[in-house]
Image (cartoon, grey):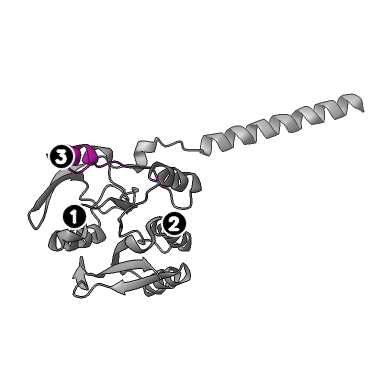
Amino acid sequence: MAEFGSASERREEGKKREEEEEEEDDVVCLDPSFFVDRSYEMTTFTFGSQVLHLLCLRAASTDYDLTGQLVWPGAVLMNTYLSEHPETVKDHSIIELGSGIIKKNIEMQSCSGNANAVLTAEKLEWGNYVHISNIIEKHPSGFDLILGADIYILLSYFAVISSFLLSQRLLCIQASKCRFILAYVSRTKVMDVLVLKEAEKHGMHVKEVDGTRTTISNLEGVIYEITLK
């Protein structure tokens, strides 16, 4: 009986090994580059008197994570507004949330000849309180202006809450002085309601800037100015 049991166990182990080997054969390992399109093209954007040369993609494929590789409609809306109202940013310290800009573009703009502007980037993942704390620790005096363009692209309740939590903390540092300029592009009515609702929930006053509602890339966009109540 002992020998029979031992043989049976060996057969079971052999069967399990065969099944595991078959499962391993079914696993496909893809290199990270499979999900990243690096076929950047130098593209020129003109906003008023400002000319920007940026490396970006022209593709619109959902096969890749294009978050920081395209110039989104909200960014065009924001830059158009700022070029028409340069006093909004003049002599101000500014933080842009969710800019998604690639490192090479930062280097190019830093070498553009504007000695009065210093451009740096900090890592920020929505809801990552370590990243949020690092930003606030590095900039204890806060900022005069918070910018956000197309940061509510996906229907993500978590992303909306996280961005407003950070904005609230940044606004509180300078209280009445700091403003949050949001270039918002509507994609779903649900998100339209959610954004305004969360701003209200976090003690913020949302004001639509007169004359900024427009159509961009077949979508409706608008500039909001957000302050603490």
Ranked by sequence position, the earlier of labels 3 and 2 is 3
Q: Is residue 114 magenta?
A: yes
> Would you say 107 lies left or right of 121 here?
left
How far apart marks 1 and 2 lie (CA) works out to: 23 Å
Task: Find residue 115 and report its image quarter.
Answer: top left
Give the SS element for disc 1: loop
Task: Report the residue at 23% width, 53% height from top.
Answer: 71
Ranked by sequence position, the earlier of labels 1 and 2 is 1
Q: Is residue 154 magenta?
A: no
Of the pair 205 and 161, the residue shown nearer to us: 205
Magenta region = 105-124
From the top left corner, tell me how far across and down residue 21 is, in percent: 59, 32
Ranked by sequence position, the earlier of labels 3 and 1 is 1
Q: Which residue is mark 1?
A: 90
Task: Find residue 190 and report its image quarter.
Answer: bottom left
Q: Which residue is mark 3?
A: 115
From the top left corner, tell me how far across and down residue 10 is, in percent: 77, 27
